[in-house]
């Protein structure tokens, strides 16, 4: 596939914004993947190239969260194994299914997710923590299921991870975001290998956009350290609404 300057002008600024949002609340793919589609990339090239640029940004965010002490590496390792299995299977499945199926699935998932957030229990840090075994089991199941989704399609993975890790595993927000970064990095890299192997990644565009993702993630992690949960819910609702409208307009 030949590239002109136009996809770079469309994708790079939006991937920067996606990295900024992703570092704070997850869900950067809700912005970055539509950016690739708006730029005219076929859906499988869009997904594969997005894995490259978002993987670069997520690597930086994971390092910064680790330095801030937000990552439980023992729990993260168990989750990473489950995420690797799920994302590899999901990426292979994605190559066999038409893009319309992805969009119809998301039209169901996105409103349900927004409703859950608006009900007020999302990101509730007052839940009593579970014991280590129950926390690990729930977090591993979350990593497997969301890993499958991330390899299969991807947008909103970080958001869904944070919601499930706080809501089901009862992790505190900073810890949930740290584990989410480990899972998201694992799923990004494993799925990227599948898409690279099948020739579905545009390396020049992905690497250029990845530099903007690095910058966005760097600024986003700094903002998260200062603001914590205050800006999280509004940003989650915003990215979910944008993606829902985008998908609905494409299907109609």
Image (cartoon, rainbow, N blue to C red):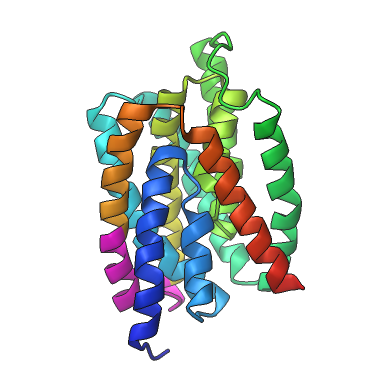
Q: Does the magenta stretch include residue 203?
A: yes
Regarding residue 215, the answer to whether it shows in the image is yes
**In screen coordinates, is 104 left or right of 27?**
right
Q: Quadrant of residue 7?
A: bottom left
Which is nearer the eye, 124 or 53? Answer: 124
Q: In which quarter of the image is residue 16?
A: bottom left
Residue drawn at the location 46% of the way across and 27% of the way down? 230
Regarding residue 202, the answer to whether it shows in the image is no
Residue drawn at the location 53% of the way across and 16% of the way down? 125
Look at the image and tell me in which quarter the C terminus lies. Answer: bottom right
Residue drawn at the location 28% of the way across and 70% of the way down? 208
Look at the image and tell me in which quarter the N terminus lies. Answer: bottom left
The location of residue 91, given as percent across then percent down, is: 54, 62
Q: Give the residues in magenta.
A: 196-212
Q: How many labels does the image show?
A: 0
Residue drawn at the location 39% of the way across and 39% of the way down? 182
Instruction: Give the residue at the far bottom of this rendering.
Output: 2
């Amino acid at each position: 596939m030949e590239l002109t300057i136009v996809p770079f002008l469309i994708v790079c600024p939006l991937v920067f914004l996606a990295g900024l949002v992703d570092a704070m609340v997850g869900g950067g793919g809700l912005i970055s993947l539509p950016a690739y589609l708006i730029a005219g990339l076929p859906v499988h090239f869009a997904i594969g190239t997005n894995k490259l640029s978002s993987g670069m940004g997520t690597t930086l965010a994971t390092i910064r969260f680790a330095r801030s002490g937000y990552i439980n590496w023992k729990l993260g390792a168990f989750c990473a194994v489950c995420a690797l299995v799920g994302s590899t299977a999901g990426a292979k499945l994605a190559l066999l299914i038409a893009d319309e199926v992805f969009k119809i699935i998301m039209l169901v998932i996105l409103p349900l997710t927004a409703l859950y957030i608006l009900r007020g229990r999302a990101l509730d840090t007052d839940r009593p923590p579970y014991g280590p075994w129950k926390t690990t089991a729930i977090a591993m199941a979350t990593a497997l299921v969301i890993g499958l989704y991330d390899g299969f399609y991807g947008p909103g993975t970080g958001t869904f991870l944070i919601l499930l890790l706080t809501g089901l595993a009862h992790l505190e927000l900073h810890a949930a975001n740290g584990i989410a970064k480990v899972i998201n990095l694992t799923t990004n890299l494993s799925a990227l290998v599948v898409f690279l192997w099948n020739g579905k990644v545009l390396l020049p565009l992905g690497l250029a956009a990845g530099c903007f993702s690095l910058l966005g993630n760097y600024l986003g992690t700094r903002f998260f350290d200062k603001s914590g949960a205050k800006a999280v819910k509004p940003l989650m609702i915003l990215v979910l609404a944008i993606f829902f409208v985008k998908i609905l307009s494409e299907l109609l």
